[in-house]
Image (cartoon, rainbow, N blue to C red):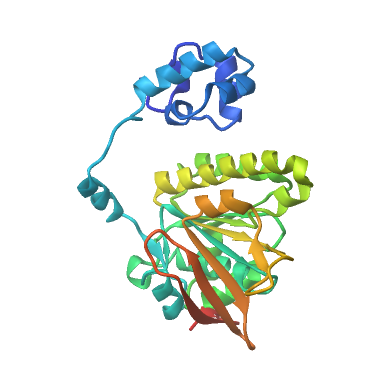
Amino acid sequence: MGKDDITDLPGVGPTIAEKLREAGYTDIMTLAVASPKELADIADIGEPTAAKIIRAARDNADVGNFESGAALLERRSKIGSCTTSSKSFDELMGGKGFESQSITELFGEFGSGKTQIAHQLCVNVQRSKDEGGLEGHVFYIDTENTFRPDRIRQMSEAYDLDVTEVLDKIHVARAYNSSHQMLLVEKVMELSHEFPARLLIVDSLTAHFRAEYVGRGALADRQQKLNKHMHDLLRWGDLNNGVICVTNQVSAKPDAFFGDPTRPIGGHIVGHTATFRLYLRKSKGEKRIARLIDSPHLPEGEAVFSVSEKGVRD
């Protein structure tokens, strides 16, 4: 049976397969970890049928396999990284910059440097591994019309790179609403067979979700969608050994009398799914401060970097 072919599963005909694929269940593994109710609702089938499909998927997927710590260490050794162009920023991130196979979330107020870092990564990921790159293409999902080719030109020229060549390897799509944004990640999955992409940027992750799901009543729905969206991003990172960078806005937390009154949008869902969370804030002039809030293995800390015409630097 083809590892990814869901039509090989008993009970999955062409019509059901089409509905499942549209909902993001594109391979056997995603079905194996689904819940019967969720599947029944999506594909308009009874829960017993859904449970049967899930059981068959579990039989065919390596769901229950445990791995040794040594095997995991071996897999971790394949993780790549992309430099930020600032030594102190790279140090904060463990020495080499942004890791592949994980989501790095940049959150902060307007002008704190989120989009600047995203643009810098677009250039850096194309450089050789010796220069801190991953020699790959970029997918950029733009929700607020923030991508600027002129900025890429400035950053490329600072490194004496061929501007046309750099821009040719950045594939940008504008997302017009949250459903479109989620659909674009599926498109990225497909196009990754065509282009050797090693970086996926979503700028901004939460803007559409925040605008469309307003009020407490819509919160559960919004969080569920965001959860699926972020897991789709992670899956792309795993399959392509790619770096995922998402930007996020902050909202004021009026009950915070001490410390910083801002917090990232998206709540616990974004917090738990993002591997690294970085809080960015403005300082004097070109200076910016990045604070590592959350990471599975790195200590909390801060780095000072600057954003100039050349791009991100120390």
Q: Residue at x 79, y 46 (%)?
A: 215
- Residue 158, percent from left and from top: 51, 80
Residue placed furthest toward the left: 70
> With 295 as the anchor, is 185 left or right in this view?
right
> With 303 as the anchor, is 23 left or right in this view?
right
> With 106 as the anchor, is 249 left or right in this view?
right
Report whether residue 277 is seen. yes
Quarter-of-image position of residue 99: bottom left
154 w.r.t. 27: above or below: below
Quarter-of-image position of residue 65: top left
- Residue 294, percent from left and from top: 48, 62
Q: Residue at x 63, y 67 (%)?
A: 149
- Residue 82, percent from left and from top: 42, 65
Q: Residue at x 61, y 85 (%)?
A: 286
Q: 145 or 269: nearer the eye?
A: 269
Report whether residue 213 is seen. no
Q: 305 or 66: nearer the eye?
A: 66
Quadrant where the N terminus is found in the figure: top left
Q: Residue at x 69, y 49 (%)?
A: 175
62 w.r.t. 282: above or below: above
Quarter-of-image position of residue 88: bottom left
- Residue 91, percent from left and from top: 39, 75
Q: 253 or 281: nearer the eye?
A: 253
